[in-house]
């Protein structure tokens, strides 16, 4: 009766919080760990962990998360520290900021996308490597070339 369900994990951790199908929440949620949403949320979600929005999940909200896998719908701006994955059934209407963005075929995204601060840094805070200037190669046959 209270045994494990198949598919109760997402990503790398066990789901700790579930907003089930048929559940409606309005307001602000602040949470950690692994959360799955299959219901409806209107408001603000500040999640310091993995967030999974299932195919039936629908959010009309401003969303902040460490990582996000979206199979349902979000209407609102989304900020993700790490990876934002829009699965084939995803619908996202709003602006996004993420270190990594993966968009699967079939996903719908309407809005602007920009990398967050973590994405624009190179490892260990070092500057980007310099690209050497191109050196002119030999001249084309019959054209002006080096004088011998």
Image: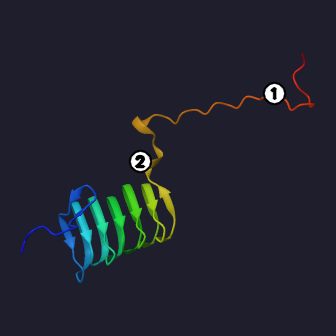
Q: Residue at x 24, y 80 (%)?
A: 21
> Who is closer to the viewer here, 79 or 67?
67
Q: Residue at x 47, y 66 (%)?
A: 95
| The label number, if any, that marks residue 118 in the structure image | 2
Mark 1 residue crowding within 10 angstroms, few (<14) / some (14–19) / many (20+): few
Q: Dividing the picture into quarters, in which one does residue 83 lie?
A: bottom left
- Sequence-wise first label, 1 or 2: 2
Q: Residue at x 37, y 58 (%)?
A: 80
Picture coordinates of residue 26, whole percent (x, y): 26, 79
> Who is closer to the viewer here, 52 or 47?
52
Residue pushed farthest left?
A: 1
Residue pushed farthest bottom?
A: 22
Q: Quadrant of the N terminus?
A: bottom left
Picture coordinates of residue 84, whole percent (x, y): 39, 60
Horizontal side, residue 138 vs residue 118: left or right: right
Mark 2 residue crowding within 10 angstroms, few (<14) / some (14–19) / many (20+): some
| The label number, if any, that marks residue 114 in the structure image | none
| The label number, if any, that marks residue 138 in the structure image | 1
Horizontal side, residue 76 vs residue 11: left or right: right
Mark 1 or mark 2, which is nearer to you? 1
> Who is closer to the viewer here, 92 or 29?
92
Q: Dividing the picture into quarters, in which one does residue 49 lie?
A: bottom left
Relative to residue 93, is residue 123 depicted above or below?
A: above
Horizontal side, residue 80 vs residue 24: left or right: right
Q: Residue at x 25, y 68 (%)?
A: 36
Picture coordinates of residue 107, whole percent (x, y): 46, 70
């Amino acid at each position: 009766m209270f045994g494990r369900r198949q598919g109760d994990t997402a990503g790398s951790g066990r789901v700790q919080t579930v907003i089930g199908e048929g559940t409606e929440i309005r307001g602000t949620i602040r949470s950690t760990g692994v959360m799955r949403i299959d219901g409806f949320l209107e408001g603000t979600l500040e999640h310091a962990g993995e967030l999974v929005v299932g195919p039936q999940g629908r959010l009309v909200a401003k969303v902040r998360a460490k990582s996000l896998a979206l199979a349902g719908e979000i209407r609102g701006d989304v900020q993700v520290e790490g990876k934002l994955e829009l699965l084939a059934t995803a619908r996202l209407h709003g602006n996004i900021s993420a270190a990594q963005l993966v968009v699967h075929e079939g996903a719908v995204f309407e809005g602007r996308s920009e990398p967050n601060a973590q994405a624009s840094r190179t490892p260990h805070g070092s500057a980007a490597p310099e690209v050497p200037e191109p050196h002119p190669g030999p001249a084309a046959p019959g054209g002006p070339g080096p004088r011998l």
